[in-house]
Amino acid sequence: MIQTRPNWTIPACCALAFIIFFAVYFCPEEALAVRPFVTDDARIVYKGQLGTETYGGTTVVKGDSPAYEARTLEGLSITDRFELTAGGFGFTYQDNQARPLDLLIQPKYVLHSSLGAIPSLSVAAATLFPLSGNRQHWDGYAMAHVSWFLFTPDPDTDPYDNNLAIHLNLGAKSRYDAGPATYQSKLYWAAGFEVITPVTRKVRFLGEVFNGDPFSFEQEFPAYQTGFRWYKDPMVQIDFVLRGARAGSLETQAPTGAEFAPGWNYTIQVGFRVLFDVFR
């Protein structure tokens, strides 16, 4: 039986569309892009700027009811090397039940920044406060980001204006279970790219493969994501994304916190990112 979208989601979608319209046409001129998709690279927002990342979408799998999600993240660059990301404010809706998403706290530090063949390097660690599910499960991750920002037009030095960007993530996902006081960890890896399209350099094609979303301890390989990013201008970017991930058991959860039966689930998302000057 196909579940129809609940009536209350219609005004929510209208509100999200209005927010996107407002951000695209009325945001400050100094805003720039933030990070791409699920994987992360060795860039941070500029010192003294606040980045906002908002997205919503739906996840479907054969034989299960769809799940709807809306989330927002905020990142503030304290120095030209240190950025603090917090948020995750949002919700999922599935089977007539709504629940909040986990709260994220992630510090990130850039060890080396460069353009060209020499890679940039950053490290990050995060804790996810369990608002969405089992309050005994405290998930997190720690990883390094290795990035190559290639073919930057001369004399441009903007790390977001490359013809091709490639990045690798390597680290670990972890879970602390406060009930029996046990700790688990598993390898996390990811690889992604962003390349200009022949039509215009304002539209980029992105792709990535990863060992499960870092926001979900249960999710594992294979998982992938692809789509397009539109740099409307230096202040705003909009993403159109398709993600596929394979769930291995009934207990496996999507990054949204929704639960699905074994098999592939697919997510379609639309997101936008913008920066604001705070104390730059």
Image (cartoon, grey):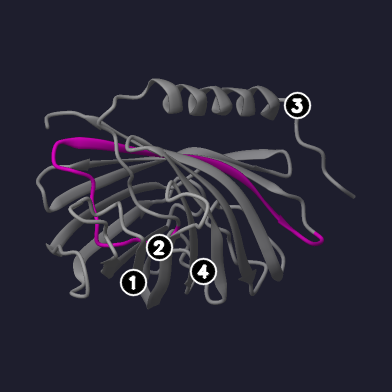
Q: Position of residue 211 (x, y in %)?
A: 47, 74
Q: Please tell me the numbered disc located at residue 7.
A: 3
Q: Residue at x 49, y 54 (%)?
A: 134
Residue found farthest to the bottom: 187
CA separation, marks 4 and 1?
Answer: 18 Å
Residue 48 shown left or right of residue 182 in the figure:
left
Pointer 1: residues within 10 angstroms few (<14), some, or many (20+)? many
Q: Please tell me the numbered disc located at residue 17.
A: none
Q: Please tell me the numbered disc located at residue 169.
A: 1
- Can you identify the residue that label 4 sits on? 218
Label 1 secondary element: strand
Amino acid of disc 4: Glu
Front one among 49 and 65: 49
Pointer 2: residues within 10 angstroms few (<14), some, or many (20+)? many
Q: Residue at x 29, y 52 (%)?
A: 160
Q: Could one spot residue 182 in this view of the protein?
A: no
CA separation, marks 3 and 4?
Answer: 31 Å
Is disc 3 in contact with disc 1, using a CB cutoff of under 8 Å? no
Disc nearest the viewer among 3 and 4: 3
Disc nearest the viewer among 4 and 1: 1
Disc nearest the viewer among 3 and 1: 1
- Can you identify the residue that label 2 sits on? 39
Amino acid of disc 3: Asn
Which comes before the other along the chain, label 3 or label 2? 3
- Compared with 249, 34 (above or below) is above
Q: Position of residue 49 (x, y in %)?
A: 20, 36
